[in-house]
Image (cartoon, rainbow, N blue to C red):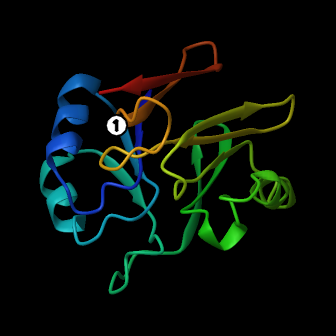
Amino acid sequence: MRVLIVSDTHGRHAAFDRALEEAGKFDMFIHLGDIEGGEDYIEAVVDCEKHMVRGNNDFFSDLPREEEFYIGPYKTFITHGHAYYVSLDPEYILEEGRARKADLVMFGHTHKPYFHQTDDITVLNPGSLSFPRQEGRRGSYMILELKEDGKLHFEQRYL
């Protein structure tokens, strides 16, 4: 199973379209918020299981603030992250993930890629496709692959 993970597109579709093309075939799509009205566009162009959450700039969105679901056997918790102060320290969202007994925690908001893995939990942020803030300022996304042996593989990609 391949999963495309994006965040913070802010209603801009050029970088999103490029990520879709570069990612190739995937079985699940995750958007971690700040879609800014792009939900209909995503619904039209992404033809697989989708999970999308509302970000701090998604003012009139009906999307949920957070969601829990499974990727294979892995319990996954997704949220935009602003309610967990991820700009200050990812420790709060890590603890929330542990409290929810999640294996995977995904957030956006900071516009910077982040990846932290321990024995019991993986916390990640794919960065922003439209307004990256990390050094080099290249739009970014992640690919998660659930291999046949049940192990997860993560790949950070840049446009």
Query: What percent of the width, then of the height, locates residue 135?
Result: 49, 32
Quadrant in which the N terminus is drawn = top left
In this orientation, which residue lies closer to the viewer: 21 or 45? 21
* Residue placed furthest toward the bottom: 60
| Relative horizontal placement of residue 6, taking residue 159 as reference (left or right) | right
x and y percent of residue 143 in the render? 44, 28
> Is disc 1 placed on a helix, strand or loop?
loop
Residue 24 visible in the shown view: no
Q: Which residue is mark 1?
A: 139
Give the crowd class for mark 1: few <14, some 14-19, many >=20 residues within 10 Å.
many
Where 117 falls versus 6 (above or below)? above
Q: Amino acid at mark 1?
A: Gly
Give me the residue at 75% from left, 52% from top: 90
Which one is in front, 56 or 106?
A: 56
Residue 30 in the image: x percent, y percent? 42, 49
Q: Residue at x 81, y 60 (%)?
A: 92
Judge by depth and name the residue closer to the eye, 97 or 140. Answer: 140
Residue at 80 percent across and 61 percent down: it is: 96
Side (left or right) of 114 relative to 8: right
* Residue 35 shows in the view: yes
Q: Does 48 appear above or below 77?
A: above
What is the quadrant of residue 2 in the picture? top left
- Image point 22% across, 62% down: which residue? 11
Q: Quadrant of residue 9?
A: bottom left
- The number of numbered badges drawn on the structure is 1
For the C terminus, the quadrant is top left
Farthest-out residue, top: 149
